[in-house]
Amino acid sequence: MHILLVASAFNSLTQRVLAELQDRGHTAGIVLALGDDEALREAVRQHAPALVIAPMLTTAIPEDVWRAHTCLIVHPGPPGDRGPSSLDRTLQGGVDSWGVTVLEAVAEMDAGDVWAWSPLKVPPQAGKSDLYRGEVADAAVDAVLLAVERFASGTYKPKRQKAADLAAGWRPFMKQAERRIDWATQTTESVLQHLRAADSQPGVLDELRGASWYLHGGHAEDELRGAPGELIATRAGAVCRATVDGAVWLTQLRPWREPGSGLPSYKLPAVEALGARLPAGLPEVPAPLELPAGRRTWSDIRYREHGPVGVLNFSFAGGAMSTAQCRRLLAAYRFACTRPTSVLVLGGLRDFFSNGIHLNVIEAASDPAEESWANIHAMNDLVEAVLTTTDRLTVAALGGNAAAGGVMLALAADEVWCRDGVVLNPHYKLMGLHGSEYWTYSLPRRVGADEAARLTQSALPVSAKRAVALGLAQRVLQAAPEELGDEVGRLAAQLAASPDLAARLADKQAARAHDEAAKPLQAYRDEELAHMRRNFFDPAEPHAALRSAFVRKEKAQHTPAHLAALGLPR
């Protein structure tokens, strides 16, 4: 079928639904619902879709559209649940199971007939954004595909929701007053529920060090203690704040701004956001690279070992990697390479693998061009270290999405394993960048020069299954987000025990020597950075404006041309 996707943003779920539909032979177009109903109507006229699906929508579809076309809305709640803050209330309320419903658009919000729904388990430690990209996205895709199948049959009759269920299921928009934390009375677990329900948007509005902030990211701390509400330590850019029975790590802060002030407000690592407001003498507690069993604390980089397999886990907020984070990860990687292992796994956690350089930190820098330059060099150093590791096999295990330099970091490994549902965006074009991270070496050698050009210029997402078909990845892992680590460990152990391991390592060493003789890695780096230097430092280049709009979450004015043309006859 030809299906038109209507979405408020081309977010992770919209990208995944698009890729999954294309994998199954459907054609799909996209129109962003940006408040211009006439533009939406025109897109519907141009596409003449058999079906309209809204994976993520914050505004209503015009009545004349849903009366003329079957329009299916994806709602992150089970049948009967209604309202705009479903996941927020689910997480803050401590619910352990939930669901996603695909229902037909009608005049009343979330009240249409149900075409499909899929249940899901809510993991105890996941924040809202992580849950949305993981279990919710899995359930949403299952429900969407079932709804499409039922619609295509022409015989399925959707289930009407009962009036009593609709009345009982309405849950209004969750305001900051309901999210507020009372540090003097709330336990660590209660504080974490509030923080997870607001991550990554809108955050929890709070007072800290004489200013108002939105708090983002919450992780338990089981050893450090202090007066409730006080900052007691820092670690790798995060701050530790005491509760009545323990403490929590806050990874990011966003300053509150008076509405209409025009002042920028975007998330930064907590220590950087506080700046001079950080208490003098606050101890910097080292991040444990190898965490003892049973500990509850936060660290964005961890290493563990199981016989011949080393696993270097890392998880950075939003998948963004600043200069400092790249350097710390490189130091951890070098340590891992000193260990007596034959297989080294990178990643292996749920949610983002990496999205490349940290645009928020760059935007906040006193000289964004210089910080961009430092960040891309730090990212390149990390990728080069992986590319030049020849004494063991390396595996990039992606539990979540990757984009731009994050994809190229994965491609530096010998094998790329993607959890089913992962979406890759192997391009830099939409940020006005040529790209670096040795992509001009890594990408063509996996997919060929023509496909590399198409991927980087089309600027469209690639599903895990499609990535394997193209040669971007070697495995699709059929594992729930919470089960990914165990599955990666099992497969890595099999790889380490493979009888052809020694031969593979010998072939790898020979191939690297051959490639280096043909064209040194430094030549690729120099060529890429010549473009990137212009992108960063030339005021006529579009990157700075695109970066600023992205960081400040400026609303698009129209559907981007590469999306508007998708699915239309050439």
Image: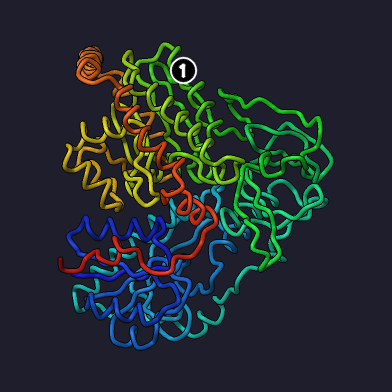
Q: What residue type is labelled 1?
A: Arg
Q: Position of residue 475 (x, y in %)?
A: 26, 37
Given residues 486 and 533, the one toward you in this image is: 533
Where the C terminus falls, by quadrant?
Answer: bottom left
Circle 1 is placed at which residue position? Answer: 334
Q: In which quarter of the image is residue 18?
A: bottom left
**Residue at image location 56% in from the left, 67% down from the top:** 85
Q: Can residue 531 be seen in this view?
A: yes
Dot 1, how many residues are within 10 Å of its Cα: few (below 14), some (14-19), or many (20+)? some
Given residues 114 and 351, the one toward you in this image is: 351
**Residue at image location 38% in from the left, 66% down from the top:** 55
Given residues 536 and 103, the one toward you in this image is: 536
Q: In which quarter of the image is residue 89?
A: bottom right
Q: Position of residue 526 (x, y in %)?
A: 34, 27
Count of picture labels: 1
**Residue at image location 33% in from the left, 84% down from the top:** 65
In the rendered image of this protein, does residue 222 appear above or below residue 567?
Answer: above
Horizontal side of 442 relative to 101 (left or right) equals left
